[in-house]
Image (cartoon, rainbow, N blue to C red):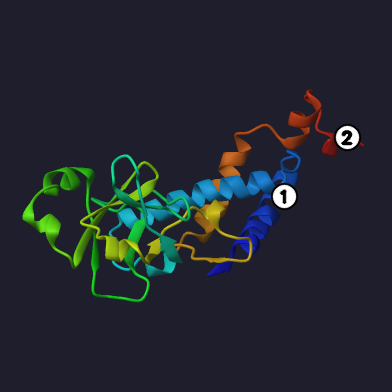
Amino acid sequence: MIQKKALIELVRDRINGEFQAKQLGKFGDQKIAYYVGQVYNSALVATFTRNLTDFSPYIKEYKSVAISQDATTETYYSTLPSPIVVLPRKAGSGIMRISGLTSTSVEFVPMTNGDLQTIDGLEVDDIDDVIGYVFKNGRVEYQGMTATVAAGTVKMELVIPFEEYEDTDYVQIPTGSNEMIIQGVVNLLIGTPDADKLNNNNSVNRNTVR
């Protein structure tokens, strides 16, 4: 694992060295961080696609997530505490697990929107110890939620994008992806105008002018 800011610094040092050799100028930290995020997030999706059985190192845990009820539809839902990486899963996407904050008596089960529509109104909808959830409209919507459970909060384990980590947070680099991430960012930036050209509306790179 590596701190987010340390990874950005590592990539920046490599990029500045390669770009100086190519006389391409320098890029700011914000732009570099953006492209690191693009490559890192893609690496996570690729890692999951390879059927990784344990995604725990890539999860960030959020506690005390509130449960609300829509006044119009009466649907119980939770607003995600962070954006998530959209993973190619049958259900749940980047929401890896939801559980009660302290109690384990209720099981939260990921569902697809189709499952949600099929199960609505069936007897299984009345089972108190199983609550289905689906990711839609930027939030988690629950099926089979009770007022008693909704009075509490839940814990969520999410796979979040690189840009959502704090600078001091540690991020897990997919095994064997260190060089791929660095080179991927270099390749993306090579295809963009350098900072000097963007700022000065001309084709002169001041870093090469003496």
Front-most of 61 and 14? Answer: 61
Mark 1, residues whose alpha carbon is within 10 Å: few (<14), some, or many (≥20)? some
Q: Where residue 44 appears, x then y in whole percent?
A: 42, 55
Q: Quadrant of residue 145?
A: bottom left
Amino acid found under the numbered disc labelled 1:
Asn
Tell me the residue at 75%/45% (across/down). 20
Amino acid found under the numbered disc labelled 2:
Val
The label shown at residue 178 is none
Front-most of 154 and 61? Answer: 154
Q: Are marks 1 and 2 in contact (CB under 8 Å)?
A: no
Q: For this view, does 119 lie left or right of residue 38?
A: left
Q: Where residue 42 appears, x then y in whole percent?
A: 44, 49
The label shown at residue 209 is 2
- The residue to which callout 1 is attached is 16
* Residue 72 drawn above or below residue 200: below
Residue 20 visible (yes or no): yes
Mark 2, residues whose alpha carbon is within 10 Å: few (<14), some, or many (≥20)? few
Q: Secondary structure at mark 1?
A: helix
Q: Where residue 206 appears, x then y in whole percent?
A: 85, 34
Per the model, the C-alpha gap separating discs 1 and 2 is 17 Å
Q: Where residue 16 appears, x then y in whole percent?
A: 72, 49
Q: For this view, does 13 lie left or right of residue 149?
A: right
Tell me the residue at 35%/57% (across/down). 95
Q: For this view, does 17 lie left or right of residue 35?
A: right
Front-most of 207 and 81? Answer: 81
Q: Secondary structure at mark 2?
A: loop
Disc with the residue nearer the chain's start (1 vs 2)? 1
* Residue 81 drawn above or below residue 114: below
Tell me the residue at 72%/51% (across/down). 17
Quadrant of the image for the C terminus? Answer: top right
- For this orientation, the residue located farthest to the left is 123
- For this orientation, the residue located farthest to the top is 202
